[in-house]
Amino acid sequence: MQCSNNLKQMGIAVHNFHNTYDGLPPYELEAARAGTFCFLFSFGEQTALWDMITNASDTTTDKGLNVNLYGGWWTTTLTDDQRKAFGSVNWMKCPSRRSGVAVATGTSQPGPQSDYAIVVYVSDRTIAAGKTTSAINPTSWWNYLHTRSQFNSQPADNWRSPWTLANIPGSDRAKWTPASNFSDWVDGTSNQLIIGEKHIPTNAIGVCELGSGATEKVLIADCSYLITDWNRWGAMARIVKRYNGLPNILTTKPSDKSEGTTSPVDCRPGDGYGFGSTHAGVCQFLIGDGSVRNLSTTTSEDVMFMLSDTRDKGSVSLP
């Protein structure tokens, strides 16, 4: 029930944000800059945390929303009490998994940890009919949204998620504007997944990285939720749609050393980057209309795809 209430509070924050800005929180401002959850702070009774971000400075000349939230700002600029404040946001933690202060250390992506992730839908399709070249490199699909340039270079139809990049004139991220709103969701709000519980390998809860290799690092989910991309998935779990017989990258499991035992419950049991929970048989999701639903762990991939795609125009109801 508390986990459901957390998601409902996020839903209220999303809708209040939309009412204020006539748009949705952005997926990100830029690599390693503020991601979706950061923009909910002011609407989730965490204005002090938002003020720390907008008034940020780091070891470079960057200020405010131009600051890299992964670099010197987190590790050297913030005080220990300030870092603990970010790691103490109650509505970012499911009590069945953790409580108290949750902060990731290490070098990969230190910062506050969370049990929730935004829904990102990416379609892995051939560029044109009759061609076998994938729009995404199947061997590194987790890195697909690593930078803004990669996002912009992909066919527009590949990105059909509720969250989109912000409009930023020039390079001044302080002047961002929402790039989308509810009216852009062709399928409506009542059948759209926007935030869900995040799968974390049981041997990686509380850990941002295991081992020293690049592959071992990027497979770990429990990193900072302030940052949406940069090879990590602290704030994002991806749903990738396959087309035209491309490799089954969804069921490729990470190495045993990195993955360990999977969560007791996982809405995407074949995908180390999916959604999952410690609630028996279900995984909870925030719906676009602000409601929260329990999805059975037996929910088919096709249904998950359609509930994550804002423009598939398919007829599907929540299970």
Image: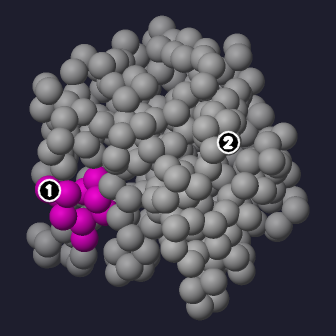
Q: Quick one: 168 or 54, which is closer to the camera?
A: 54
Magenta segment main secondary structure: helix
Q: What residue is rendered at 67% in x and 63% in y?
A: 56
What residue occupies the far top of the structure in this picture?
280
Dot 1 corresponds to which residue? 139
Dot 2 corresponds to which residue? 82
Check whether the beta carbons of the residues at disc 2 and disc 1 lie within 8 A of each other.
no
Position in image of residue 91 (x %, y %): 70, 30
Position in image of residue 279 (x %, y %): 51, 12
Q: How many labels does the image show?
A: 2
* Residue type at the position of mark 1: Thr
Q: Which of marks 2 and 1 is nearer the N terminus?
A: 2
Q: Is residue 291 magenta?
A: no
* Residue type at the position of mark 2: Gln
Decide if residue 286 is on the left or right side of residue 96. Answer: right
Q: What residue is rendered at 54% in x and 17% in y?
A: 98
Q: Magenta part of the protein: which range?
A: 135-144
Which image quadrant is residue 39 in?
Answer: bottom right
**Helix, strand or loop at disc 1?**
helix
Position in image of residue 14 (x %, y %): 75, 49
What is the distance, in whole Å, between disc 2 and disc 1 at their CAs? 39 Å
Decide if residue 32 is on the left or right side of residue 23. Answer: left
Q: Quick one: 199 or 258, which is closer to the camera?
A: 258
Disc 2 crowd rating (10 Å Cα; few below 14, some 14-19, many 20+) is: some
**Helix, strand or loop at disc 2?**
helix
Q: What residue is rendered at 71% in x and 80% in y?
A: 175
